[in-house]
Amino acid sequence: MKTVALLYDHTLDVGGVESHLLGLLRNMPKDEYRFIIISQTSAGFAEKAKALGAQIIEYRRWGGLDPRAALGLAGILRREKVDLVHAHSPTAALAGRLAARWSGVPAVVTVHLPVTQYHGIRTTPRARLGRWIFTELDRLLNYSATNRLVYVSQRVRDECVRQRLSPAAISDVIPVGIPLERFRQPFDRQALRRELGAATEDVILTFAGRLDEQKGVNVLLEAAAIFMPRLTCARLWIVGQGPLRPPLEGQAHSLGLESAAHFWGKRDDVERILAASDLFVLPSRYEALPIALLEALAAGLPAVATQVGEVESVVQDGVNGFTVLPGDAAALAGAIERLAASAALRQRMGEKAREMAMRFDERVTFQQLEKIYAAALARLAK
């Protein structure tokens, strides 16, 4: 049995990376791999991961450019007799690949977001300098200390290769997967809507994701202020937690949306929320391939999303939803209103959404990842 260390530098709680890691634990052969998650974790995530057989090692010393981060990790890798390092963020990959090199084990990196976007979009001199430093270090390690780079988006992979951020020869694409059966449960939709407080005539527009600058929820609220006076049956459900929740709630109040916009906070039953909804909205400023969007499509929801990352290959404009440019509140409002105003259009697009989601069965995803692991370990054994 081989021991794999999964590295992440933020607190694992609820979100796309968390869903990906839990899917990995569910699907990789338990008689071949033992997993250690080295990260900060919430109690809820740790409980789920442990139930799937993972060991948790709480680790807080990521420290950006602090060499002690890599030294501390190297000590853990040796103590736990780790055979393979698998990092899931650029910061974790920076320290993790150095630690792997010092410990003589292979390193795999899954790129959920490219390094140029992972460190935010602020334009201050300090922010630009920090992004440049991390980008150049990531480039160096991609070429010198990485066995395989796994991109969740073909577009992101190709752009990184074009910019020589990543070597083409070791840059693969494995789209994220989701547990399709979880989002296709036979819920009693009307009973579920009553339980969640939705009236029969309400049209529920749902966003699910982390409440931070990336996701563009402030633009969604601006759009809601445009269309809701004309579409009085519309209700906006915002599912998720994050640093921008207080200012977003303040924005909703200032726009007069208190009765129409509901902030659900963190939920472990997103499949129930989606089953009670009518359409999904993702107003992100940047993405690779968002898991929340795939989950919504699997639940049969048409989507209105922004033209970022791999989104346009998943939301086909006019087929299973509509796409608009990021940051354009008026265009977002128009697309939402068009879809919200027609139950027939939502039903037709919802059927196409389910068909699209069939391409993202997590079992296929992790069969491909297992081949990456096997190849990296075989190379080490030579």
Image: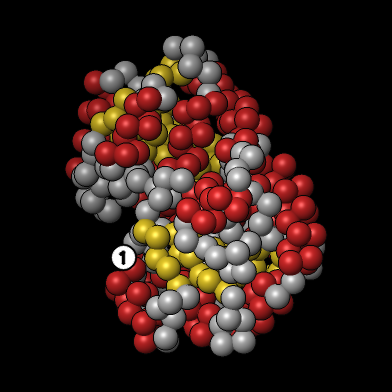
Q: Residue at x 70, y 71 (%)?
A: 339
**Rendering quarter of residue 330:** bottom right
Q: Quadrant of residue 53?
A: top left
Q: Could you say where residue 295 lies in the image, as x and y percent from the top left? A: 59, 49
Q: Secondary structure at mark 1?
A: loop
Name which residue lies at 48% across and 65% down.
Answer: 237
User: Residue at label 1?
Assistant: 243
Depicted 137 relative to depicted 47: above or below? below
Measured from the top left, where is residue 231 in percent x and y? 62, 81
Whether residue 324 appears in this view of the structure is no
The foreground one among 304 and 272 is: 272
Q: Nearer the viewer, residue 47 or 205?
A: 205
Front residue (pair 238, 372): 238
Count all numbered tags in the image, as a single digit.
1
Placement of the N terminus among the 4 image quadrants = top left
Query: Relative to 320, is 181 above or below?
Result: above
From the viewer's perspective, is 78 left or right of 169?
left
